[in-house]
Image: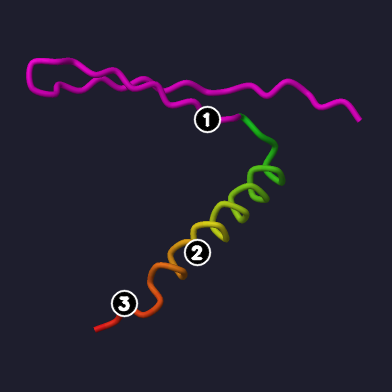
Amino acid sequence: MMQAQVKYESEVKTAAFGERTITIQNLTPVLPPKERDKRKREIEQSLFDVFSKYATGRRG
């Protein structure tokens, strides 16, 4: 199975930091809704695993 070339939406933001100007370019993949939802669930699960690992034993 051949995978299609992924296209990206670009968002550029500029911010002043002291005397410097910093430009940040955010690239977001353009995905079909099902694929986007699948990736979102994968990321959420990974983040949950990380936060759960570091939150254990840190209560009050």
**Which quadrant of the view contains residue 11?**
top left
Q: Residues within 10 Å of mark 2 (few under 14, many from 20)?
A: few
Q: Identify the secondary structure beneath mark 2.
A: helix
Which numbered disc, 2 or 3, marks the residue closer to the eye?
3
Q: Position of residue 35 (x, y in %)?
A: 70, 43
Dominant secondary structure of the magenta stretch? strand
Q: CA distance from mark 1 to mark 2?
A: 22 Å
User: Residue 39's spot in the image, x, y percent?
Assistant: 63, 47
Disc 2 target residue: 48
**Alpha carbon separation for disc pair 2 and 3:** 16 Å
Using the image, determine if residue 10 lies above or below residue 37. Answer: above
Disc 1 marks a residue whose amino acid type is Thr
- The amino acid at mark 3 is Arg
Whichever of callouts 2 and 3 sits on the residue coming sooner in the sequence is 2
Residue depicted at x 62% and y 54%: 42
Precedes in sequence: disc 3 or disc 1: 1
Q: Which residue is mark 1?
A: 28
Q: Is residue 24 left or right of residue 34?
A: left
Task: Check residue 25 for magenta coloring.
Answer: yes
Q: Which residues are magenta?
A: 1-29
Which residue is located at x 30 percent, y 22 percent? Answer: 13
Q: Is residue 49 above or below residue 41?
A: below
User: Which amino acid type is shown beneath numbered disc 2?
Assistant: Phe
Q: Which residue is mark 3?
A: 58
